[in-house]
Amino acid sequence: MKSFGRNLVELVLKIKKTFRVQTYVIEYVFVGGVLIAIALISHKGLVEWLGVLAVFLTFGHTSIADRLHERESKRYNIDRKVEVQCYWKLNYYFVERGASESVITFTSSESKTKYKFST
């Protein structure tokens, strides 16, 4: 009997071939779907949705950063050509993650009370 991990790898490879997408696209769809499902189930409102956005952007940033780290170490030893096609998204996710975190921090009900914001 195949292990769960092996079956998951085979499923991802089949999805990649069928839809002609890269692995990170499958990861984003999966993580985004899980986060949206949690937000819908929780019924927490705007702060929950802002949290979903922040977590998703953090995941995107981390996903690309991890790939860059792996590829850059290989590139260093081979030929110095760019191997990670989505590397340019790294700074976008970093900035958007920081902006989302700031919005969440300063719009949450605890922050309004702590910093005396009026609504």
Image (cartoon, rainbow, N blue to C red):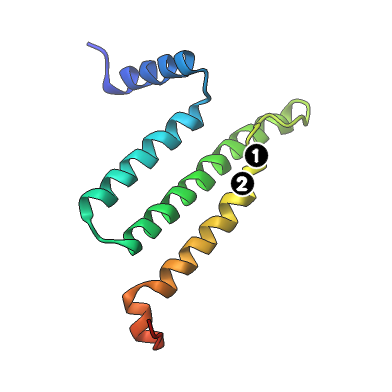
CB within 8 Å, label 1 to label 2: yes
The residue indicated by pointer 2 is 90
The residue indicated by pointer 1 is 87
Q: Which quadrant is the N terminus positioned in? A: top left
SS class of the residue under badge 1? Answer: loop
Q: Is residue 92 above or below residue 29?
A: below
Q: Amino acid at mark 2?
A: Leu
- View extreme (bottom): residue: 116
Please name whichever residue, 19 or 83, is drawn nearer the observer in this view of the structure.
19
- Residue 11 in which image quadrant: top left
Q: Is residue 85 above or below residue 59?
A: above
Mark 1 crowdedness (10 Å alpha carbons): few <14, some 14-19, many ≥20? some
x%, y% of residue 100? 48, 61
Residue at point 60% right, 39% down?
69
SS class of the residue under badge 2? Answer: helix
Residue at point 49% right, 27% down?
23
Q: CA distance from mark 1 to mark 2?
A: 6 Å
Mark 2 crowdedness (10 Å alpha carbons): few <14, some 14-19, many ≥20? some
x%, y% of residue 21? 52, 23
22 lies left or right of 36: right
x%, y% of residue 30? 37, 34
x%, y% of residue 60? 50, 44
Residue at point 43% right, 48% down?
56
